[in-house]
Amino acid sequence: MKNNTLEPFLKVEHSLLDNEVLTPVEKCLYMLLRRLKTAVRGCTPSHAYLKRKLKIKDKRTLVRALDKLQLFGYITWRNRGKNMTNKYHFREDEDFQFILQSNLKLRNIMSQKQKQVYNQKLRDKFVNKKGIKVINC
């Protein structure tokens, strides 16, 4: 006897499938996020959940994959606060462009701060190694 119930399915953009830069894991991550879009609270999975579903061991791998999807403009996210999961947004979402621009500005600010910290550490290391005294003006 045939079962007439339909299995749910997911539509995926051709541009994602044709993208030769994204890895299979990154494409699967995007498809998993798309599937979660219809959840009651929206797409708000934890990093632990995403790592478990995709069999990713290192959090940095997951973060790099999310970052790459954001840079290609497939997804973006809004940080909902400490001890809360991010809420992911997709291209067709109303406020996608605004959130994406905010994230890219924040990324630039964070990058500048990291460069300053790196330069300060490098300077301190040089000063300590050479025994140079720095006089603040």
Image: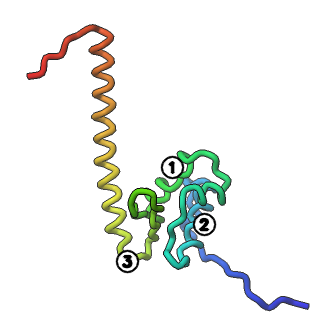
- Hey, what amino acid is under mark 2? Leu
Which mark is drawn over residue 94?
3
Q: Quadrant of the C terminus?
A: top left
* Mark before the other along the chain sequence, 2 or 3: 2
The residue tagged 2 is: 32
Task: Name the spot of residue 14 as percent of width and height, x first.
Answer: 57, 70
Which amino acid type is marked by label 3? Glu
Residue at the spot 45% in from the left edge and 61% down from the top edge: 84
Q: Which mark is residue 64?
A: 1
In the rendering, which numbered label is found on residue 101?
none
User: Counting residues from the N terminus, which is met first, the one under dot 1 or under dot 3?
Assistant: 1
Q: Position of residue 65 (x, y in %)?
A: 53, 53
Judge left or right: residue 59 versus residue 57. Answer: left
Quadrant in the picture for residue 7: bottom right
At x 60% / y 53%, what residue is drawn? Answer: 23
* Spot occupied by residue 12 in the image (x, y as percentages of width and height): 59, 72
Residue at image location 47% in from the left, 54% down from the top = 67
Please, is residue 40 above or below residue 102 in the view?
A: below
Q: CA distance from mark 1 to mark 2?
A: 16 Å
Q: Farthest residue in the top direction? A: 131
Cα gap from disc 2 to disc 3, whole angstroms? 21 Å
Q: Secondary structure at mark 1?
A: helix
